[in-house]
């Protein structure tokens, strides 16, 4: 017997990816319902090879009888409709930032803390972490099991798709404008993104960090270990899809780079491509459209005691959002919502 699944925010980058991922992974659905704002009602979205979904109005939709909702409509919209869906008996996997730090809502990466899913019963909601946090903790988990991590310093190189379709359009349009000598006008971003990098994602906070950097700190602690110190610098780069991260880790005990490499090779959701030669690493272009978190450039950091550095890359729309949400739903139906 299949499950009735609603996808909230179905016309956005992540929503479309969620629908595609459900089809690709043969999620046992009896029905998939595409939901979005009133202006998108009637639009058609492909599901699998031969099905077309017509978008329905989220605001007026009755969630009674829906088993699972995968939600990515933006935090303000989710704050209204995710609790409404949960009240109707639907379990919501929410991809927005709104519920992540709610103590009664589990924040889950299935390769890292699948046991936390059990906490969904409190509010009927499970939170999907921030895209940059997801790929980092997938890589950190086997290393933390190996040597217990004390501190992480991470610099991110985040693609424009993390800011939505309008941001992708802005990169395309600015790039074209530069080539034809037209004026470049930033709209979605604070500065020109084409041929540039912007060390500013989300709003600035009182301590000088941005909210994206704060998210990586608090979410890593909630998912992996509350005692890990995290310092992040988050940067938007002119790449369409896939986030990259340079991660520096300090352990409580010495961890040999070969030991770390072997632990990462055995870890679920991780693919190690680490050859000290030309092309012996993964870049955003190779990761786009792929499911794993790719880890490269594993090496010892001799400047601190028990230090190790690595490079990791993942498709932010897939593992960073849609795939992680569907994986949560897969554990949910396997362990909690069996039919």
Image: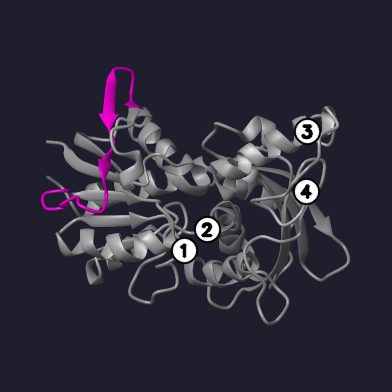
Is 50 situated left or right of 253 in this image?
Answer: left
Q: Earlier in the sequence, mark 1 or mark 4?
A: 1
- Could you classify mark 3 by the number of other residues whose Cα lies within 10 Å: few (under 14), some (14-19), or many (20 or more)? some
Q: Which mark is residue 192?
A: 4
Q: Nearer the viewer, mark 2 or mark 3?
A: 3
Measured in 3D between alpha carbons, the distance from the residue under mark 2 to the one under mark 3, in whole angstroms, is 32 Å
- Could you classify mark 1 by the number of other residues whose Cα lies within 10 Å: few (under 14), some (14-19), or many (20 or more)? some
Q: Nearer the viewer, mark 1 or mark 2?
A: 1
Q: Specify whether residue 110 is painted magenta.
A: no
Q: Is residue 268 something one can see in this rendering?
A: no
Measured in 3D between alpha carbons, the distance from the residue under mark 1 to the one under mark 2, in whole angstroms, is 7 Å
Q: Main secondary structure of the magenta part?
A: loop
Residue 307 occupies which quadrant of the picture? bottom right
Determine contact: label 1, label 2, CB under 8 Å.
Answer: yes
The image shows residue 256 at horizontal and vertical percentages of 74, 56
Identify the residue shown where x is 81% and y is 71%. 305
Q: Earlier in the sequence, mark 3 or mark 1?
A: 1
Is 184 situated left or right of 335 in this image?
Answer: right
Residue 147 occupies which quadrant of the picture? bottom right
Q: Earlier in the sequence, mark 3 or mark 4?
A: 3
The image shows residue 57 at horizontal and vertical percentages of 26, 45
Q: Which residue is mark 3?
A: 177
Element class at badge 1: loop
Identify the residue shown where x is 19% and y is 55%. 90
Element class at badge 4: loop
């Amino acid at each position: 017997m299949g499950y009735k699944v609603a996808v909230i925010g179905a016309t956005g980058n992540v929503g479309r990816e969620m629908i595609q991922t459900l089809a690709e992974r043969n999620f046992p659905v009896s029905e998939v319902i595409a939901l979005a704002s009133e202006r998108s009602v009637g639009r058609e979205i492909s599901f699998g090879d031969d099905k077309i979904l017509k978008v329905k109005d989220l605001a007026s939709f009755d969630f009674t009888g829906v088993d699972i909702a995968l939600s990515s409509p933006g935090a303000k919209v989710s704050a209204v409709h995710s609790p409404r869906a949960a009240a109707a008996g639907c379990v919501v996997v929410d991809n927005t930032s709104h519920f992540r730090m709610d103590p009664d809502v589990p924040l889950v990466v299935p390769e890292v803390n699948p046991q936390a899913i059990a906490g969904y019963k409190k509010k009927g909601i499970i939170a999907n972490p921030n895209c940059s946090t997801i790929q980092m903790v997938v890589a950190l988990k086997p290393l933390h099991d190996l040597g217990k991590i004390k501190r992480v310093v991470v610099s991110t190189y985040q693609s424009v798709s993390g800011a939505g379709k309008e941001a992708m359009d802005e990169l395309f349009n600015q790039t074209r404008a530069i080539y034809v000598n037209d004026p470049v006008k930033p709209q979605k971003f604070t500065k020109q993104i084409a041929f540039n990098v912007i060390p500013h994602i989300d709003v600035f906070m009182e301590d000088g960090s941005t909210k994206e950097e704060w998210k990586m700190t608090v979410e890593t602690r909630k998912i992996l270990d509350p005692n890990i110190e995290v310092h992040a610098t988050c940067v938007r780069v002119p790449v369409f899809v896939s986030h990259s991260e340079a991660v520096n880790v300090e352990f409580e005990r010495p961890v040999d780079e070969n030991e770390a490499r072997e632990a990462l090779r055995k870890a679920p959701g991780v693919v190690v491509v680490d050859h000290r030669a030309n092309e012996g690493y993964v870049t955003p272009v190779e990761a786009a459209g792929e499911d794993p978190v790719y880890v490269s450039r594993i090496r010892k950091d001799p400047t601190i005691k028990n230090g190790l550095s690595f490079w990791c890359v993942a498709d932010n729309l897939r593992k960073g959002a849609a795939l992680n949400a569907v994986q949560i739903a897969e554990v949910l139906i396997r362990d909690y919502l069996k039919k």
